[in-house]
Image: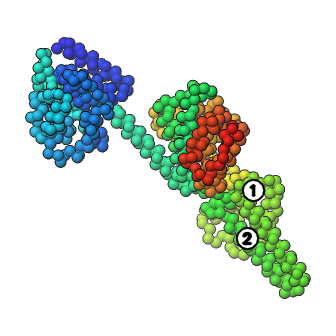
Amino acid sequence: MADLNNLLLDDIIKLSAKLAEGCEPDTVVALAADSAARIADADGCFFFHITPNHFMNLVYSRIESLNTSVSGTSNMAFFPSVFLPDTKERPTKRPAELCALNKEVINTPNIFDIPNIDKVFLREFDETNNYTSLSALIFPLFDSRHNIIAVAQFVNARDAKGKIISFTADNQEKMLAVCQMAVFALERKQLSESYTQLLESFVDVLAKAIDSKSPYTGLHCQKVPIITRMLAAAAVQETEGPFKNFEMSDNDWYALHIASWLHDCGKIITPEYIMDKSAKLETINNRIHEIRNRFEILRRDAHIEYLQKRLKNIDTKENLQAEFVTKIKQLTDDFEFIGYCNIGDTPLTDNDIKRLDKISERSFTRYFNRMTGLSWGEKKLINTPSTYTKPEVEYLLQDRPEQLAALYNQGELTNLKIRQGTINAVERKKINEHIITTINMLKNLPFPPDLSNIVEYAGAHHERIDGKGYPNGLTGDQMSIPAKIMAIADVYEALTARDRPYKEPKKLSEVLRIMRDMKNNGHLDPDLYELFIKSGVYMDYAKEYIDKDQIDDINPEEFL
C-alpha cells in the first residue's frame, strides 16, 4: 500500500507540473487516466471528452494486456464521435453514453449486467480484440460550473495475483480525484477556445461594421489579411538574404491575423462621404450639379441678351450669332474644365489653379432667399443672414463663409483647387485620424501579453520607411517586419481594388509601377517589396482575387 501511495503521490506531482506548464490536455488526460488505472490495477481505461455542444469523443484509450495505447482522434476508428442527444431515444446505450446521460457513477462486477446496456457493442469489441470485459467503473466528471465535461471508464480491476475483481469504493474515490485533474486541463482549453471564439466574433462583427459603412471598401478588411499572410509566409520560407532568420511563432501568426483584420477598425468614426469621396465637390452628393445649374443660368442669360440685342437691332444677325456662339463655347469649355478638375485623376498645374480663379470671378444674380429651408445648424454658420435674404450678385465658384466654416471645409473653389486626388487638407486629417483611433481602440482591449504586438502590427501600416508616415513618423528600423508587411498589403489591396469610386481599376503593371516608385521614394520597405515581386505573391493574389482584365503582361524584373 505504501508503494502505491508513493506512486500515486509521484503521479499527482507530475500532473501538477504538467498543469502548471500549460501542457496540452491530451498529455494530461493520458497521465491522469494511467495513474487512476494503476490505483485499482485496471487493465483497461477509456477517457471520453464531452464538448460544450454535447458531442462525446474518445480522446484516450489503453488496454495493458493488449499492449495498446491510443491518444487523440485516432480513437475515432474504435469509437466514432457521438451526439449525446441522439442517444436518448435508443433503447440500449454504450456504458459511457449511459453514464453521461444519467450523470451517475456505474460500478459493477460484470459490465454485461448493466440495465439497458448495448451488449452487442461490448461483444463485438471483445470478439474483435480477443478480450473479456468484466468488472467496470464508469464515472462522470464535471467542470467548475457542474457541467459534465468528461466520462472516465475503467475495465477489469485486478488483485495482487492478477485475478479480475470489482472496483472498491476506496479506489473509486481515489480514481475520481486523480481524473479530476484532467478536467482542469480540459476546462482551461475550453475557456481558451471560448476566449478565442469571442475575440474572433468581435473581430468579425467590427470588420463587417466597417465594411457596411461603405459599399466601396467593403472587401478591404477581408483581403488585406490574405495578402499579409501570403507575404509573411514567403518571408518565413526564405533561407538566405535579409529574411533568412525571420521566424514567426503561433502567437505571432495569430496576432498578425487579428491585426490585419482590425487594421482599419478606426474607420468606424470616419464619415462615409469622406471615405467614399469620389469627386472634389462631393459631400453627401456631388455638388458639381449645383455649379452646372449656375452655368445653365449664365447660358440662359447669354441667350436672353442675344435675343434682346436682336430685337433692338444693335448689330447684324450674323455678328450677334457669332458673339453668342463664342460665349456659349467659353461657358462649355469652362464647365468641362471644372468637371476635369473635380474628378482629381490628374494633378493640377499652376495654370489650372489660375484658370479656376479666373472662372470663379464670373458672376450671376441670385434672386431667391438663401436662408429658406436651412436647418438650425446651417443657420448658425452664417454670420450675416441679412445678405442672403435679398437678391444679390454671386460668383460662379464660391467659398462662402459658412462653407469654409463647415466641419470639413466645403468651399467649392477650395476643394476644386485640390492639387491631387479628391480629399482636402481637413478631410485628409480626418481620414488619418482613423489610424490613431485604431491604435487607441486596440490599446483598450485586454489582449494577453503574447498578443500584445497586435497594436504595433495594426497601428503602423501607414508609416513609411523614411519616417514621413503617420501617426508616429516611425522609420523602417523602428518597425517590425510584420508591420512593414501589412503596409505593403494595405497598399496593394487598395491599388488593385476595382470597387473604389474615386479611381478606375488599374492594370497590374500600373499598380506595380506605382509600388516600385513608392519603394524608391522611401515609402515601402525595399527588401519586402523585392520579396513581394520575386516570390510571386503579387501574382498569386492577383490570379485569385482581382479581375482577369486587370492582369496584363508582366515582366517582374521591370518592377524591381
Can residue 523 be seen from the camera position used here? no
Q: Which amino acid, by three-letter code, is at mark 1?
A: Lys
Question: What's the colour scheme?
Answer: rainbow
Q: Name which residue lies at 63% across and 46% down.
A: 432
Query: Residue 174 appears in which quarter of the rendering?
Result: top left
Residue 166 lies, with reference to residue 229, above or below; the image says above
Residue position for label 1:
417
Q: Helix, strand, or loop for circle 2?
A: helix
Residue 391 on image: x %, y %: 74, 74
Q: Name which residue lies at 64% across and 40% down.
A: 470
**Quadrant of the rendering where the C terminus is positioned:** top right
Residue position for label 2:
294
Say which label, 1 or 2, has the lower sequence index: 2
In the displayed structure image, the side of residue 188 where residue 120 appears, left or right: left
Q: Name which residue lies at 63% across and 36% down.
A: 534
Q: Nearer the viewer, residue 163 or 209?
A: 163
Residue 437 on image: x %, y %: 56, 44
Circles 1 and 2, Cβ within 8 Å, touching? The answer is no
Q: Name which residue lies at 17% across and 46% down.
A: 90
Numbered-mark total:
2
Residue 292 lies, with reference to residue 521, above or below; the image says below
Residue 168 on image: x %, y %: 12, 24
Rounded to the nearest angstrom, the CA distance separating label 1 from label 2 is 19 Å
Q: Helix, strand, or loop for circle 1?
A: loop
Which class describes the residues within 10 Å of circle 2: few (<14), some (14-19), or many (20+)?
many
In the displayed structure image, the side of residue 340 where residue 284 appears, left or right: left
Mark seen at residue 105? none
In the displayed structure image, the side of residue 50 where residue 530 appears, left or right: right
Residue 1 on image: x %, y %: 16, 14
Q: Which amino acid, by three-letter code, is at mark 2?
A: Arg
Which class describes the residues within 10 Å of circle 1: few (<14), some (14-19), or many (20+)?
many
